[in-house]
Structures are given as C-alpha cells and as structure tokens.
Image (cartoon, rainbow, N blue to C red):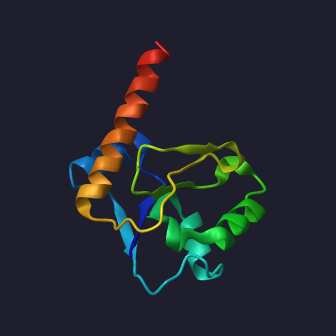
Amino acid sequence: MSILLLEKNVGLRNLMRGLIEDRAEGIFVEEGEKPSEVGGILNKIYAYRLVIMSWEDFGRTTLDAILNKSRDLRLAPQIWVLTEDDTRIIHREAFEANLILSKKEHFSPEVLKALAKRCYENEEEKMRSLG
C-alpha cells in the first residue's frame, strides 16, 4: 500500500486537476514506511498539504499524533482515507481533514483519479454556490 503525498505549494483545485490529468506533483511513500510510526512519516505528512492513504495504514496512532501536533489547527494537513464506499465523507473540523473510511482499498491510478474528480467537482460546486 502506498501513500500519496502531494506538495503544499500546489493549490488544492490545481492539485485535483493534476491528479485527473496525470500531472499532480507529489511523491509516493513506500509500503514499508508505516504512518502509524509517529517519527519520520509524521514529519513527511507535515511537509505536504494533502495526504491520501488507506484507513488500514492510517490508524489511530497517526490521528492522535496529528491532533497533538496541530497546535495551530489551520496548519494541519488534509487527510483523505479511501474506502470501498468512497462517497461517505466525514468532515473533522479539528484539523480540517476529510476522512473517507474503509478497510482495504488500494490506490490504483483509477481510484486516485476518481477521488480527485469528485473532490474537484465538489470544490467547483462550492464556488458556484458562493456566487
């Protein structure tokens, strides 16, 4: 299972468009690097604006560590965790994250594109509704 970390300096809408068009700027963290190991991987998460990983890999330890580290909650990363039912979104105001909960979703390019497309469309809809 890989974790896709997307760079902070890329705007969210451009980032989503980049995923859809196969040109998102980001890195994959190898499967051996477990997010639940709070040390190095948590710092990597904080170096990026958006993190996409499996709920299985994400784990409770990482959630607690992020909440504890986020003294300024506006600086916390957005975390999307994919699920089998990827339309179920839980919005956590505590660190401005969208968590989509599941057990065993793999991050194929198709899954990432579908997520990016939906998120981009949601952002577009929000912009339209604001006038």
Residue at 48% over, 44% down: 88
Asked if 37 appears above or below 111 in the picture, the reply is below
Residue 5 appears at what percent x and percent y? 44, 64
Quarter of the image with the N terminus is bottom left
Q: Is residue 89 left or right of residue 61?
A: left
Asked if 105 appears above or below 95 in the picture, the reply is below
Q: Is residue 108 left or right of residue 92?
A: left
Residue 39 appears at what percent x and percent y? 65, 82
Residue 42 appears at what percent x and percent y? 61, 73
Residue at 41% over, 32% down: 122
Residue in front for this viewpoint, 96 or 8: 96
Q: Is residue 48 left or right of residue 125?
A: right
Asked if 54 appears above or below 71 in the picture, the reply is below
Most distant residue in the top direction? 131
Residue at 41% over, 68% down: 104
Residue at 42% over, 43% down: 87
